[in-house]
Image (cartoon, grey):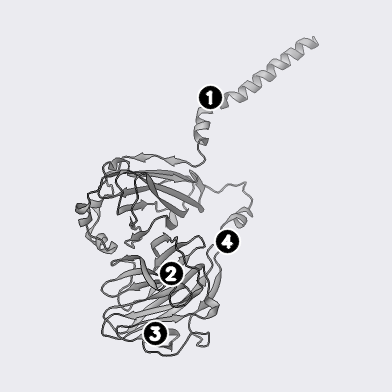
Amino acid sequence: MASMKHSTRQVATTFFILLLAAPIVLFWPAIISGLEGYIPTASAQEPPDNDFSLFSISDETWAALGLSSEIIEASNASFNLETVKRTNTLSVASGSAITFTIAITNHGPDAAQYVFFRDDWPDEMQNVAFLFNRAVISDGLAKPTWVITEPIPKDQAAFVTVTGILTSAPNVTVKNQVTAASAGETSPANNTSEVSVYIAGHSPIRPLYLPAIFKSPPKVLLFSDGFSNNSNGWTTTDDSNCDRGFQDNEYRMKVDADKSCFTPAPSKAEYTYGEFQVSARVSDGDGEFAYGLYINGSGEDYYYLFRVKPDDECGWLLTRRKDGSSTTLASSGCVSAINRGATKNNLIIKHRNDGVITLYINGTQVYSINDGNSLTGVGTGLYAEADNDKDITVRFDDFRVYTIP
């Protein structure tokens, strides 16, 4: 009798185990499919009906990029671009950061020049930032068109990293699509790639302290000057090019016609890597002019100079001065991000310790490059120039230096 009870107990136990295991066995392929690939990949897809191409670019965008649509007709190159987009996760909690990586590979046979790139990120994505491994320019719009100005040789790729915060009501699926285009493209069908991301609710079992521990460290203000105190170390001396001083809680630089003027910041503002920003406006004068700020200075022959031209050109330039010679790393024609005339412009130049330099105008990222010939000086300061036969007066405010998180 005992043996029979034991046997019956074994059968019942076995049946119970099989009952629990049945769902796992039945849905095992689906489980494996859901877990497959630590970094999910989106393969190239057919372009949508409203596909982005060189022929869809408006005249205003061509002008903002400082380029001409004639490059389409002038190109004799032939190549096949393939765009593949990846993301570090397919599901996030609302308010979480996400990173997308895009590879634009040139399968040849020729090098690809002037590759246009556009990321149509969803409205739920905020604080969007781009990082390119090749030199680029932008039209400066809220959702910009980028041009990779550095050629992509055969069997090589341009890489783009896009970061942001996905915020929405929970249980929403959003799509992020990217498209590349260039004159000479022979197979545009694989130029578009798309990733879908599910935005879930916050996990109720996640400890409350985890976000505070693992979120990115905030940037730290290293130096700030609103120019209300004229004893902070800014020069008030005059020279043959420039009259400097304080006026109405701003720093004034009056530049003589056909001259340029550099003014170093106090030594407390000197840093090699960080985020450097200032706001500037023209208070007197007209014609052609420019203003901006420089970083990584070490004497007169070493610095990066970021300047905007809010005159009729309404463009910007990034110049590297080294060993007595200047190199224009990037420039752009008229961009909508620049406020014209006497309206104030806010400028930011970031320099990371890996050599990446990123430029912002009024909150819009317009350029990013990894300078392999990076400067490491600490001097920073202000710049103004008058390009014609008229004097110009520029006023600066809110000069700040931050660490980069």
Residue 172 in sight from this viewpoint: no
For label 1, the crowd category at 10 Å Cα-Cα, with few meaning under 14, some 14 to 19 and many 20 or more, is few
- Secondary structure state at the residue bearing disc 2: strand
Q: Earlier in the sequence, mark 1 or mark 4?
A: 1
- Secondary structure state at the residue bearing disc 1: helix
Q: Are marks 2 and 1 in contact (CB under 8 Å)?
A: no
Return the mark for residue 26: 1
Return the mark for residue 234: none
Residue type, mark 4 in image: Pro
Residue 102 in sight from this viewpoint: yes
Of the 4 image quadrants, the one containing the N terminus is: top right
Camera-side residue: 325 or 404? 325
Residue that sits furthest to the front in the current view:
323
Query: In the image, what residue occupies the spot 34% across and 48% down?
Result: 153
Query: In the image, what residue occupies the spot 56% across and 24% down?
Result: 25
Q: Are marks 4 and 2 in contact (CB under 8 Å)?
A: no
Residue pointed to by mark 4 = 217
Q: Earlier in the sequence, mark 4 or mark 2?
A: 4
Q: Earlier in the sequence, mark 4 or mark 3?
A: 4
Residue type, mark 3 in image: Met
Return the mark for residue 253: 3
